[in-house]
Amino acid sequence: MTNSVLKNIRILDFTWVLAGPYATRLLADFGAEVIKVQPLLPQEEDAFARGYYNTWNRNKLGITLDMATPEGIALAKKLVALSDAVVENFTPRVMANWGLDYQNLKAIKPDIIMLSLSTMGNTGPRRGNTGFGPTIQAFSGLTHLMSYPGGSPLGPGTAYADHIGGLFACLALLGALEYHRRTGEGQYIDVSQVEAMTSLLGDAFVPGKEEEAPCGAYRCKGEDRWCALAVFTDEEWRGFKKALGSPPWADGKRFATLSARLKNKKALDGLIEDWTQQRTAEEAMTLLQKNGVAAGVVQDARDLAQDPQLRQRGFFIELDHPRMGKTVSDAAPVRLSDTPPGYSCPAPLPGQDNDYVYGELLGLSDSEINKLKKQKVI
């Protein structure tokens, strides 16, 4: 990776699932040497060649290490001494049980940076609460917000909170690295995913009134196809009527002003859906956009994969995986002109970098490495 902005940074990565691996993947995309600590698994349980794991762990080195053994913990501590940062997203008790909490890490390397990413943080009465994205969305209130009037809470169709947690963690770690560059001091970062998610809800829970009409997602031709649209100004309302072919009902008193449209919103939504259901979501979107109305297809995964805007903007990247072949995933969301992200390798297979990490970095001999393999420590 030419001009990699983080090329001299080494991160020991104890993360798993999505939030933590996403944070360290972002850093790896910009050149950090991220050493992914992988558990030892029987071959039939090998998770390292699956699409999910590959998506969140590209550009990383991979080592196997049995953290249930004293030898494994001793090796981890040696790696801490060579690292700039340690990142983990276990429940609070895990790192402490291994003797790898911040106080112990600081004794090994006084200027170490440690970042913990958990459901509700490492302090307080709810520190032991566990959860994934959907749990965090429920705790934060996001799931409650995403429901139809009078309906049950639905939540988003993906682990949105995990992405948010990963982005918050990445930003916090970059701040700590910059602080270390200036002062030479390390620090402990404790990220609560619930707090991160809640901070983005803004005034969503403050009682208020709807400010535009029409506004919503309307059913279109086809199975579960929808078009979202919103009209904000009188000029847009005129463009909206033109897109619909200027139907007589649109010029009636019931819809002549914003206040009238808000008062008669249910009837207006029904008339709009009569129009959208005669067209595909793409046709409705195109007609509305041509007439100055904000509109878009409610996209499913297939739509996103084929979206011409995303493709043109380089949203997708391809990597060759030794077991899965060509894989496609999302690029880094941050683009820097002088130090762009790089995509050099897929997620590591089990222990593929053991020789480099244990041999070259830690200085273990071949016989020592072979002994550890026989002991099933690595």
Image: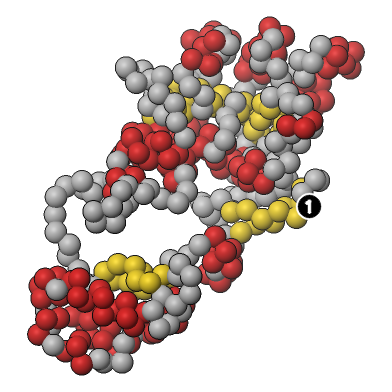
Residue at x 73%, y 45% (from the top left corner): 345
Residue 247 versus residue 254 in the image, above or below: below
The quadrant where residue 218 appears: bottom left
Mark yes or no: residue 8 visible.
Answer: no
Residue at x 61%, y 50% (from the top left corner): 341
Nearer the observer, 74 or 335: 74
Q: Which amino acid does label 1 sit on?
A: Gly
Mark yes or no: residue 355 visible.
Answer: yes
Nearer the observer, 32 or 244: 244
Residue 242 versus residue 27 in the image, above or below: below
Q: In this view, does 198 lie to the left or right of 79?
A: left
Position of the C terminus, as image quadrant, is top right
Residue at x 66%, y 30% (from the top left corner): 36
Picture coordinates of residue 357 (x, y %)? 75, 24
Nearer the observer, 295 or 355: 295
Q: Is mark 1 on a helix, strand or loop?
A: strand
The residue identified by callout 1 is: 325
Label 1 crowd (10 A; few <14 / some 14-19 / many >=20) = few
The quadrant where residue 17 appears: top right
Residue 83 versus residue 201 in the image, above or below: above
Q: In this view, does 358 lie to the left or right of 83?
A: right
Residue 142 versus residue 169 in the image, above or below: below
